Amino acid sequence: MREYYSITELTREFDVSTRTLRFYEDEGLVQPIRRGRTRLFRPSDRHLIRQIMRGKRLGFSINEIREIIQMYKEPPGEVGQLKLMIKRIEEKREDLRQKRRDLEETLAELDQAEESCVERLVELGVNT
Amino acid sequence: MREYYSITELTREFDVSTRTLRFYEDEGLVQPIRRGRTRLFRPSDRHLIRQIMRGKRLGFSINEIREIIQMYKEPPGEVGQLKLMIKRIEEKREDLRQKRRDLEETLAELDQAEESCVERLVELGVNT
DNA sequence: CATGGCATTTACGTAAAAGTCAATTAAGGT
DNA sequence: ACCTTAATTGACTTTTACGTAAATGCCATG
């Protein structure tokens, strides 16, 4: 496992701009350490970026992503906090399950759409 | 099946503002007919709104949603167009499959996070 | 030491997707 | 006819998530 990644390495890996990664730092989503002024991203930062990108693809806002990332961290020590966190995790999961239903429905409709197209091609006597 | 829906009925059903529905009309996503100045939404418009909301929850932009909606429409008559559409549909499906992978991974991590919390509670001797 | 090539900071810009507000207008009840 | 309520329009504003440009720093290499 590499110790550090440069900002440009990560921009290439995740296909984002340096501006974006600095923006995530401003937002407190990642905390690369500094050597002088240059940022050194650790594997943990890299993993966070991976999670951020996943969240983005799923249409979560930065704030939602921040919430989700909180959930991946060490569970809190206090009982009330723990119960609260479990509740929030359950909410997010419900959110994701809704997305999954949306996703399956959309996929199904696209399947149908494609079938119509293929049928149409057959009608037109195209050799598939 | 109802013939027409008023704008406010639909704002209630989908929990959006009138501004939003008018915005979608401006964007050409729905075309309610008019009686005088008031909009009458047909079941097809209602269905479109349902699809729009689904797309939004999945993080698609208005433009992407517009593209997807195009795909649900009648397939074009020309062979080249048909093949192009099939290609685009396949692309969107790949997009959705990626989202599905993201979703499953996120769900799995949340499962793990919750488990950690529950374990923690047990350690603290909380009667679950 | 000058050149090239990333990095950084600061500051301003912008597109998307609505929200908000004010001024009208139309429709329905009494 | 009048009043109220709901709907419309248009203009302006806001938020999010970065983009972009300018000025400058750091450092390796010829």
Image (spheres, coloured by chain):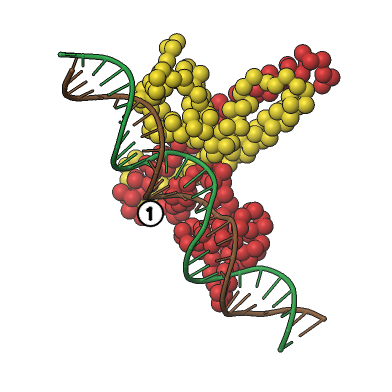
Chain colours: A red, B yellow, C green, D brown
- Disc 1, SS: loop
Instruction: Specify whether residue B105 is in view.
Output: no
For this view, does D17 lie left or right of residue A121? Answer: left
Return the x and y of residue B109 as percentages of the image width and height. Answer: 52, 45
Return the x and y of residue A80 as percentages of the image width and height. Answer: 30, 49
Q: Identify the residue at image location x=82%, y=21%.
A: A128
Chain where mark 1 sits: A
Return the x and y of residue B41 as percentages of the image width and height. Answer: 44, 20
Query: Could you tell me how many numbered marks the image carries?
Result: 1
In this view, B13 is above or below D29: above
Q: Amino acid at mark 1?
A: Pro
The quarter of the rendered structure image containing the N terminus of chain B is top left
Instruction: Specify whether residue B1 is in view.
Output: yes
Q: Identify the residue at image location x=33%, y=53%.
A: A78
Residue farthest to the right, as pictured: A127
Residue farthest to the top, as pictured: B1
Quarter occupied by residue A42: bottom right
Foreground: B70 or A122?
A: B70
Return the x and y of residue D23 as percentages of the image width and height. Answer: 56, 76
Q: Identify the residue at image location x=46%, y=60%.
A: A28
The quarter of the rendered structure image containing the C terminus of chain B is top left
In this view, C10 is above or below B31: below
Mark 1 packing: few (<14 Cα in 10 Å), some, or many (20+)?
some
Quarter occupied by residue A86: top left
For this view, does A64 lie left or right of residue C3? Answer: left
Foreground: C17 or B36?
A: B36
Q: Identify the residue at image location x=74%, y=26%.
A: B81
Q: Residue under label 1, please give it.
A: A76
In this view, B125 is above or below C27: below
Quarter occupied by residue B65: top right
Foreground: B14 or A98?
A: B14
